[in-house]
Amino acid sequence: MTYAVRAGLQKFDIATDLEIASIYQYYARWIREGKLKVSSDWNKDLKIKFTAQDPCQIVRKSYGDAVADDLRYVVKAVVGEENFVDMYPNKSNNYCCGGGGGFLQSGYNDERREYGRLKLDQILATGADYCIAACHNCHAQIHDLAEHYEAPYHTVHLWTLICLSMGILGENEREYLGPDLAEVGL
């Protein structure tokens, strides 16, 4: 959505005084300013490992490594720097998950999953317990890859971890979390 608004404004030369930015940039700013009070203390003893997907539209096609750095800043703030394992390659060079551009709804599930094996292997190489996918298409694709190939990781939205780190994630918002996170903060 951010990419579409930004690209549309540029393509049709629409002037606006609105700041068009990624939510990752806002999260990072709000954490730095103390407006979003997150903590990674919940994961100090658990030591659950996380990796993060760099969404194509936001990172590679729009804001580049600067927004990827903001994403990592937020992730480390909510899970602990020592519990973040980066993929390689990453940031602007990260691999596409294969779920965007309508591919999820295309009906070509076998082809989509085969393309996604590159992302699956990349996630598995990190050894992370969770892949943070802040983009909805990435989340759906990465989750589907884990289920289809019976991969040993869970997929989680960034906002879910932000809420968990603030102690405000509700009981009914934990259904897709693994057993290691299902009870955290309750």
Image (spheres, grey):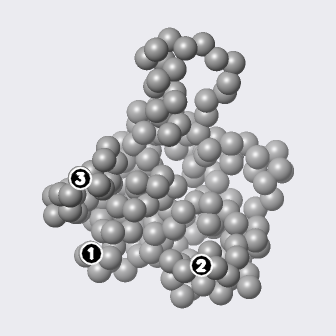
Residue drawn at (30%, 56%), measured in percent from left and top?
104
Vertical comparison of 163 with 115: above or below = below
Nearer-the-camera pick, 98 or 72: 98
- Tell me if mark 1 has few (under 14), some (14-19) or many (20+) residues whose alpha carbon lies within 10 angstroms of its own: few
Residue designated by label 1:
148
Q: Earlier in the sequence, mark 1 or mark 3?
A: 3
**Is residue 119 found left or right of 126 in the rendered image?**
left
Residue designated by label 2:
174
Vertical comparison of 167 with 20: above or below = below
Q: If the image is split into quadrants, where does the C terminus sit?
A: bottom right
Say what secondary structure mark 1 lies in.
helix
Nearer-the-camera pick, 129 or 147: 147
Nearer-the-camera pick, 45 or 135: 135
Q: Position of residue 152 (x, y in %)?
A: 37, 80
Residue designated by label 3:
106
Badge number at residue 175: none
- Kind of residue indicated by mark 2: Arg
Q: Residue 43's image quarter?
A: bottom right
Say what secondary structure mark 2 lies in.
loop
- Kind of residue indicated by mark 1: His
Q: Earlier in the sequence, mark 3 or mark 2?
A: 3
Q: Position of residue 108 (x, y in %)?
A: 18, 57
Say what secondary structure mark 3 lies in.
loop
* 3D distance between C-alphas at marks 1 and 2: 21 Å
Q: Position of residue 85 (x, y in %)?
A: 48, 63
Q: Is residue 40 visible?
A: no
- Tell me if mark 2 has few (under 14), some (14-19) or many (20+) residues whose alpha carbon lies within 10 angstroms of its own: some
